[in-house]
Every structure is written in C-alpha cells, then in structure tokens.
Image (cartoon, helix red, strand yellow):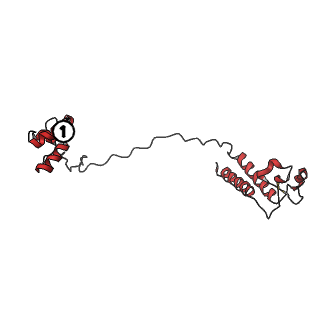
Amino acid sequence: MSTHDDKVKRLLDGEIDEAEIAADPVLASLAERIFGLNIEPITPSKPSQQPTGPEVEVVAAKTSHDPMIEVIPGATPAAPMPLPELPTIPKAVESKKKGGFLKIFGITSLLVAVANIFGLFGFLNSQCTAEKCTEEATRINWAGIHEINNELGWSMPFPEMGIPDYVAVACSILVLIVAFRRK
C-alpha cells in the first residue's frame, strides 16, 4: 500500500490529526466531502516575510509658515552693482559656403533631365545599331542607359514619359533643395 492510500485509510478510520489533513490538500478535500469538516490548509510562510524588528513610529515633519528671510523695516536695499567690462566677441570668419558642389550638381542634373525629356540628346541615337532602332526615339531611357547601342536604351519623345524621367527630375530638384537649405 502506498503512503497516500495509507493516509486515506487513516482518515476514514479517524486516526489522523487535523494538522496532517490541513497539510495535504487532497485529504482536506476528502475530509470536507465525507465528514463535512472545513479544514483550512496551512500556508507556509517564509521568515523573510515576517516583520523583524520593533515597529517605528512615523512622525510628520513640523513646518512653520514663517518666512526664512527676515525683513527689517526701514532698511533700504543695496544699490545694484555695475556689470563687469567684458571683451567683445569676435565675429566668426565667414567660411566658404557649403553646398556649392551640390548646387552645381543639382542644376546640371535638372538641366540634363529636362533636356532629355524634350529629346535634345536625340543626336546620340546614331549609335543605335540594332535592327529595331527608330529615328523617332530621341530620349535616352535612364533605366537602360547602358544599352544605348540598341532599342532598349531609347524612348519616344515628350508626350511619353516614363518613371525614370520622373525620378531624375524629382531627385535633381531634391538635391537643389538640400543644396540651398545648407548654410
């Protein structure tokens, strides 16, 4: 017989004490169901959770509403002292304006992108050696600029614009904005 069976047998025989029943939740449940006994289980507590020392009385700090500065009637305040003489701060030397390269690059890239949109680089179409090359394609396709010698490197003129053209114009305008915002 196991120890649990032995405890149940002792519970039924009435030979078990309440501390042992309270220590085992299964036995406490059985005792409540069989005999109607309500035995509270013992909850173990750690020594660190128990109060260790005498209780300390907490006293609120006493404060007064008296001002800390004593005002003497009839006394005049001291005259203000003159400010010390400070040397003047030298002007910062104007350095070369930053963003000069970005301005030049932005303006150049914007001019090249707009010129390409209107087909001003159409004279380079003479390098196209493939069979499908047409003289009407006068715009360089920025996405296929490495294929300038065949039909994939060329696009139709102005009314047709592709995403690379929009990106080229937008990026050059963005570079110009950054260049002019720099100080």
Compared to residue 88, the image places residue 180 above or below, namely below
Which residue is more in the foreground, 16 or 123? 16
Quadrant (top left/top right/bottom left/bottom right) for the N terminus? top left
Q: Residue furthest front?
A: 1
- Whether residue 37 appears in this view of the structure is no
* Quarter of image, res 13: top left
Which residue is more in the foreground, 150 or 177? 150
| Residue 50 spot, x, y in % from top left | 17, 37
| Residue 110 spot, x, y in % from top left | 75, 54
Mark 1 crowd level (few <14, some 14–19, many ≥20, 10 Å Cα): few
* Quarter of image, res 162: bottom right
Q: Which residue is mark 1?
A: 5
Q: Residue at x 84, y 50 (%)?
A: 148
Circle 1 SS class: helix
Which residue is more in the foreground, 19 or 101? 19
Relative to 129, 16 lies left or right: left
Q: Mark 1 belongs to which amino acid? A: Asp
Q: Residue at x 78, y 57 (%)?
A: 114
